Amino acid sequence: MHNIFSRVNNVSAFLSSCMMTLLAAIALSSFLFTARPQGDLTVSSIKVVSSNARRYPNKKQDLAFVHFNITADLTPLFHWNTKQLFLYLEAEYANKQGVKNEVVIWDRIVRKKEDAVIKFEGKNKYVFRDISASFNGVPPASYSLKYNLMPYVGVLQYGEAARTSEPVAFPATQSRL
Amino acid sequence: MFTEELKAFKRLGFRHVLLQILNFASVIASGLMIWKGLGIITNSESPIVVVLSGSMEPAFYRGDLLFLTNPPNERYQTGDITVYKIPGADIPIVHRVLETHDVSPKTKKSKKAAAETTISVPTLPHQRLLTKGDNNYVDDIELYQGLEWLERKHIVGKVRGFLPYVGYVTIAMNDFPQLKYALLGGLGLLALIQRE
């Protein structure tokens, strides 16, 4: 039965299996790129300010304002299967109640190799607050720059590009900035 | 127009038709088995999802296929991309974790429990999560339908793998239902008529 239907069927089956093999090969090839670039991260200043809570205007809520410097060359992470890098700066600390916290305070999407040399100086992009509403007496937090490598096809990879050399303490709360 | 096909159908005989129906059923059954098997391995109720919205652009576009796992003894970290379903919301949402707060589980020490079990099972911390779409300006608290935090029980899985465009077929079928019926009808007819 060499009618048109069976031909089309055979050709498309062959093409799709070729496609699958190629995609699998590309996905596996990204495990060959094992560059783990390291950058530099310093926290220049932190301020803690008392403010109103988001949902409950009558409640008080401490907000932390963190100023930091990032220098990192992440170009080695860009290979042929890198669609984009999602960079994020994370604060890790345990509060007085023993709750372990990880809070992303800044992020950036890097889509091109030319933009992968990061030189950034600034403050947090997202609200940094503790679930107990106060940073009073909270032990020092350590800050780290992490990345999520997102491929064109395949497995998402995670890594750490920089970390503060030692935990940074929260200062006493100010009533206004 | 269909006389040829009908003749062919008659020529094949009753047994052949039965065999084809059986084949068709086994294809459907094995598909279901693979899906449910994957669900058990990954501990996720739906281990493969299709992206339906643009809130994670430019990482994920509409129609991209995501592969999920939900390991029971692994905590979620910031930067992980989760798929979650809030009770009352009709579609699952794919967004990235912005905050995690691990509240260590309260150790209730009643005498009864102490007498019954002497083995201490390491329990995972009770996690409170906050998520945000990469393409959104604000976090997801408005999407949580009044909840303050996302919890483990709302989460379907963590995105591990990515395959672009493939899921667009299902979106097209949802947008144009005729396509779905045409495809299903065509496949069914072919399965019955085809020899070999």
Image (tube, coloured by chain):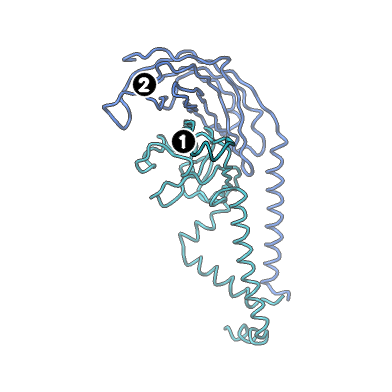
Chain colours: A blue, B cyan
Check if mark 1's residue and mark 2's residue have beta carbons within 8 Å.
Answer: no
Question: Residue B156 at what x, y percent from top left?
Answer: 51, 46
Q: CA distance from mark 1 to mark 2?
A: 37 Å
Residue named by callout 2: A62
Q: Is residue B107 left or right of residue A14?
A: left
Which residue appears farthest toward the left when viewing the image? A58
The answer to whether marks 1 and 2 sit on the same chain is no
| B74 in relation to B177, above or below | above
In this orientation, which residue lies closer to the viewer: A174 or B58?
A174
For the point 70% across and 33% down, the residue is A33
Mark 1, residues whose alpha carbon is within 10 Å: few (<14), some, or many (≥20)?
few
Q: Secondary structure at mark 1?
A: loop
* Chain that bears disc 2: A
Hey, what amino acid is under mark 2?
Answer: Asp
For the point 48% across and 17% down, the residue is A139
* Chain that bears disc 1: B
Quadrant into which the C terminus of chain A falls: top left
- The count of marks equals 2
Figure quadrant of residue A31? top right
Q: Secondary structure at mark 2?
A: strand
Hey, what amino acid is under mark 1?
Answer: Ser
Question: Residue B88 at what x, y percent from top left?
Answer: 38, 50
| A104 in relation to B133, above or below | above
For the point 46% across and 32% down, the residue is B106
Figure quadrant of residue A35? top right
Question: Residue A146 at what x, y percent from top left?
Answer: 57, 27
- Residue A156, label in figure: none
In this orientation, which residue lies closer to the viewer: B89 or A108?
B89
Residue named by callout 1: B110
Quadrant into which the N terminus of chain A falls: bottom right
Q: Is residue A64 left or right of residue B68?
A: left
| B68 in relation to A73, above or below | below
